[in-house]
Amino acid sequence: MRVGIVREHTHQERRVALTPEVIQRLRNRGYEVIVERGAGEGAFYRDEDFQTAGAEVVSSAEEVYQRADTIVRLHMPTEAESAHFRSGQILIGTLQAWRFPAQIEQLRTRRVTVFALERIPRISRAQGMDVLSSMASIAGYKAVIVAAERFGRLLPMMVTAAGTVPPALVLVIGAGVAGLQAIATARRLGARVEAYDIRPAVKEQVESLGARFLPLTLEIDQAEQRGGYARELPEEIQRRQREALASYVARADIIITTAAVPERPAPRLITAAMVEQMTPGSLIIDLAAETGGNCELTLPGQWREHHGVSIFGPINLPATVPLHASSMFARNIEQFLLLFLRNGRPAVHFDDEILRQTCIAHEGHLYPFAEQVQSTV
């Protein structure tokens, strides 16, 4: 199997899908790798590094598409890029396929086999290839760093000759991987931290990091869906949720929102009226900006101010830490590619549960419910 990686052109993307370290190991398992010239520059990898690892560096993305059996991407290719794919090729990446029906249809008609890594099941065996968790941990960390840099006050308590400075209060909404990392980072910086999640099961994890879990009792049945992710709530429960959160939002100095529902728009948890009750100088960092935002006022990729409160909807925060983010992503991809091995050689098959659940297109058919994919060689 010949694997190809190209330079990503998504907004401010600096990561690369495979690193030289991982390429060297893949070659030892029977994979060949083709890399577009300059693909790793944003993550501080030179073309020479890829060549030393055994990859072939070519002059254009078009040549990669022509020669590779499998294309590994960080993002969904554009419609223009999708036109380069041919029948029988494989596309692997964090594609957010539900947001790009036109590209998926284009790939289906070209009979491309598509694996969407956001559909990797949350089972023990899949932890090493869980790209969402890897990138979410970076986003949660970086969100607090961005907030601390922008915030007009100190985060930790300080006792000085000029008096005592009280610690800032950080509220983290959503205690998944990104939220837990945000809690840990804010605590390390000395802030007081409160956290909320609709899943009661995460209370123990929140408290183990030194944060206070908000005592909101909304009597939500089945707050989790399969895999431990939060499920989408009916509008009436969302309204009650906003009402219950309002007083905690009003007193927070910094809010980090991370609430997300797989393959659905982000739940709206903070209204403009709630923002107007916050103290001027407060901050909201909305990590759900790319899928609509948890705050009503979020503008994806932009800072804005409303009644003295700064609101930021960052897009692709992991790309701001390109070296470590690329390293983590590449190791996830390595583990996923190893699933294709049969009798020591890479080949397309669907014997593995993880391959079945992540496949969304194969041989001209769509598989919106991946378990429908039948075993195929």
Image (cartoon, grey):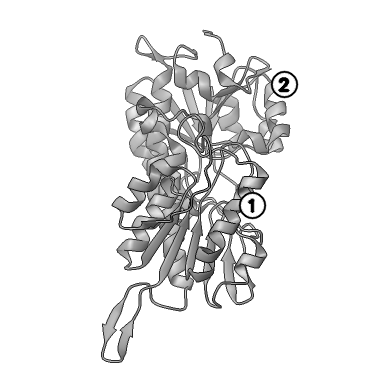
Residue matched to label 2? 109
Between residue 74 and residue 316, name the one nearer to us: 316
Q: Disc 2 and disc 1: Cα gap in Å?
A: 42 Å
Asked whether the beta carbons under mark 2 and mark 1 sit within 8 Å of each other, the answer is no
Question: Do we see residue 283 in this rendering?
Answer: yes
Q: Secondary structure at mark 1?
A: helix
Between residue 240 and residue 103, name the one nearer to us: 240
Earlier residue among tags 2 and 1: 2
Provide residue 321's location: percent of width, then percent of height: 43, 54
Q: Residues within 10 Å of mark 1 (few under 14, many from 20)?
A: some
Residue at x 37%, y 42% (from the top left corner): 49
Left or right relative to 179: residue 24: left
Amino acid carrying mark 2 in the image: Thr
Provide residue 118's location: percent of width, then percent of height: 52, 34
Residue matched to label 1? 239
Residue at x 33%, y 32% (from the top left corner): 24
